[in-house]
Image (tube, rainbow, N blue to C red):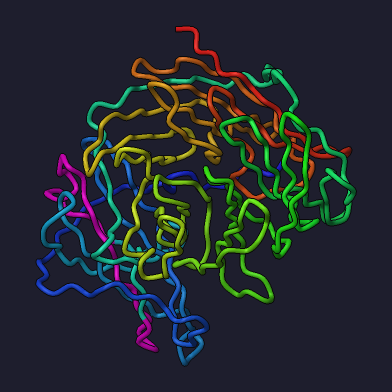
Amino acid sequence: MRRPGIRSLAGGAAGIAAGVIGGMALAALPSAQLAPPGSARSVEATHLPPVLTLPGEAVTLRYAIVCSPTAEGGPCDGTGELFVRSGHSGPFERIPLRRGVDSSEGRYYAAVPPAIAGSPGGISYYAVLRDRATGAATTLPSGGAAAPQRSYRLRDAVNVHLGAHSFGAARTAAARVVDAAWGSAEHELGRAGTRELGFVGPSSFDVQGDGTVSVLDQVNERVVRWRRGGADDVPVDVSGGLADFAVEPDGSMDVLEPPNRLTPAPVLRSFGSDGRPRWTQRLSDRTWAKLALGPEGPVVQQQPSEQWLPVARDGLPLDRLAQAERGRPGRALAGGRELVVERVGAGELRLAETSGDAVVRSWRIVSATPLGEVQLAEPFRAGVLVVVKAYTDERAEDLVLVLDGAGVARAFSVQPAEWAEAAPLVRFRLAGSALYHLGSTAAGAFVDRFDLEVPR
């Protein structure tokens, strides 16, 4: 079995923490920079931000810089500076990045001074990274000082110890609400690929409050909607690549597409409920992890910024700079709150609900079984519902946790059914008091419903 990916892609990437050094004050700060499309003088970079830290943890920020080889054929000669501050307002301090021993530990790094790293209000920071040979530079996250990366201290987290996961006791669904054969006929779902290379099926799905299930059938360039009275097929002009998908309250649809031969950058496409195109907007960053709906419109977790960036507001698209300047580490919730999620190491998951720049409540989950990608993290009743992969070298199951102020109110596992590939983080959706699961077999694709009674 292929092991799940290292990265957590639902509200924050896996953080790295270690070491400390000193820094110096900075008066003038560079503004956000967005590289022009197709620029020959460019530099790429990645960073896994430690968005949720514990009291006493040291913080080292690590970056990988990818740029052109030197004139002598040597590796990229990068450099950079970190701009960091205590809390989330006020002046930044400048710390030069140091070159690490090897790229697996972070080719460039800066240890945050203890006086800053230990701030009860957390820290905020951004980096400017350069290629010495060409002078090309990039700012990470892309919003720079206008939207720096934020890291919060968890001082009163609810501790949850899961122990070792018991495989083979997955819960049976309450109902199968969609059961579609492979094909292109009415209400069937398309697949592409070969037995040798594997198959691709429906890319994503969404569930509305009334229980309507909409499946993005990108192979057949349509959305298939199942309602209580039947099903209907809605043509949509999509590329056919693995895309994320969301249905807005008014019935309009958002499709988040990867680059392709005709569109060399990722884009969000907006369609009316009848499938007619409304607008297309390029993302600020070079790639994406997940699409969600915020209080004001669609938001996308973009990379390498590793932030949630709004792509539209009140039905109108935001340009790349406007997206970058509104980046946040957590996904926007109602009432000005955010949900921040971070995987730490192989068996730890941290979650926090924030209001403004303060942590309102938080959880720290520790598992003896490794935890993989976070498929879903949503507010639910008085707490949060999380779906995270539990895995070993031989087995994997999706673990559903309903968290409240006392810990785990309910837990069960779901057997993966991933015969055909979908987008990375689209297998589960929460609607009302039910959890929905998209799966596939050799016969076709399905959506199951799990009811979420919480007997406390």
Q: Based on the picture, tell me whether residue 424 belongs to the magenta stretch.
A: no
Residue at the image position 14 percent from the left and 63 percent from the top = 93
Left or right of 374, for residue 239: right
Residue at the image position 52 percent from the left and 83 percent from the top = 38
Q: Nearer the viewer, residue 211 or 149?
A: 211
Q: Nearer the viewer, residue 351 or 174?
A: 174
From the image, which quarter does the N terminus lie in?
top right
Residue at the image position 48 percent from the left and 27 percent from the top = 385
Q: Position of residue 123 (x, y in %)?
A: 21, 50
From the image, which quarter does the C terminus lie in?
top left
Q: Is residue 319 above or below residue 305?
A: below
Q: Is residue 153 above or below residue 37?
A: above
Q: Position of residue 212 (x, y in %)?
A: 66, 35
Q: Position of residue 395 (x, y in %)?
A: 69, 31
Count of labels in the image: 0
Query: Magenta residues?
Result: 110-136
Looking at the image, the residue that sits furthest to the bottom is 71
Q: Position of residue 304 (x, y in %)?
A: 44, 62
